[in-house]
Image: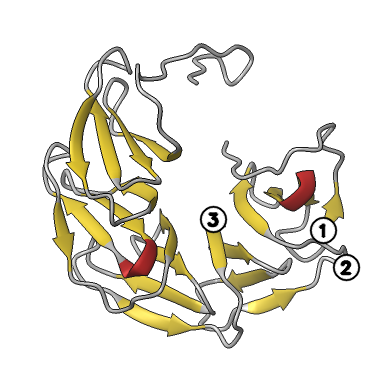
Amino acid sequence: LISSNSGETWFDISPNFIENFTSVEFIDSNKILLTTETGKIYYSANFGKNWQLVFNNPDIKLNDIAVLQNFRVIAVGNYGKILFSSNSGKTWATQDSITFRDLFSIKKVKDGRIFITTSTGLLLISFDNGNTWKSKHIGVVNNFYALDEENDLIVVVGDNGIILVNKNNENLFAVREPKITIKDFYSIAYCSMERALVVGWKSSILLTKDGGVNWAKISAHTSQELRSISF
């Protein structure tokens, strides 16, 4: 689904085939990339009117994709799989990985670092546009499903209701207890400098108004599991 008016109305640009899509990324105002659970990447050059299969490996479950600098795009998946493209997603190759853990999301922050969230308390960090990676163990064993950043404040969310906060690029990630019983958080997005929303298990929505120090539960008016949020 695509909205061109800040989400007020939506129209369908679904391809004429059935897939379970896991992520979507715009290269520019016309070019779009999609990843699937069955290891496929689709490319559209005309705002979703037509789609081209540009990568296909059924042994890989792809979870997320991100457009970086200099026409570079990276997709991540289970078992430590990292794919890269040097031509804005038209062709793909496999990149050496430093872990066999599942990779759930990829995010570039404002200072140029790129983070990959993974399972069992590990983050992967790149300082060179995704060419090489270093591992960072946080000191917990949770799966990290998503990460977002605003004004030098990085927040990571994951299973068993964990929320981690890193402020001013410090090495230490502080655990924030939302004091609300939530099984899993799947996605986080900042909507302003101090306000962020987290979504997850059983229609869970949490809101912070102070940069992640305190969290309050918000009614979702649905019973469906919420997997992603974006602004």
Q: Residues within 10 Å of mark 2 (few under 14, many from 20)?
A: few
Residue at 60% x, 79% y: name it.
173
Tag 1 residue:
215
Circle 3 SS class:
strand
Q: Amino acid at mark 1?
A: Trp
Q: Amino acid at mark 3?
A: Asp
Q: Which of 217 and 102 lies nearest the eye of the viewer?
A: 102
Give the percent coordinates (x, y) of residue 9.
60, 11
Give the percent coordinates (x, y) of residue 72.
19, 48
Vertical position of residue 33 compared to residue 67: above or below:
above
Give the percent coordinates (x, y) of residue 125.
36, 72
Vertical position of residue 207 compared to residue 20: above or below:
below
Q: Residues within 10 Å of mark 3 (few under 14, many from 20)?
A: some
Circle 1 SS class:
loop
Tag 2 residue:
179
Q: Which mark is residue 34?
A: none
What whole-number distance in Å separates the C-alpha atoms at marks 2 and 1? 8 Å
Q: Amino acid at mark 2?
A: Lys
Circle 2 SS class:
loop
Determine the residue located farthest toward the bottom in the rendered image: 139
What whole-number distance in Å separates the C-alpha atoms at marks 2 and 3? 21 Å
In the picture, which quadrant includes the C terminus?
Answer: top right
Vertical position of residue 192 compared to residue 177: above or below:
above
Q: Quadrant of residue 38?
A: top left
Q: Which of 168 and 136 lies nearest the eye of the viewer?
A: 136
Tag 3 residue:
148
Q: Residues within 10 Å of mark 1 (few under 14, many from 20)?
A: many
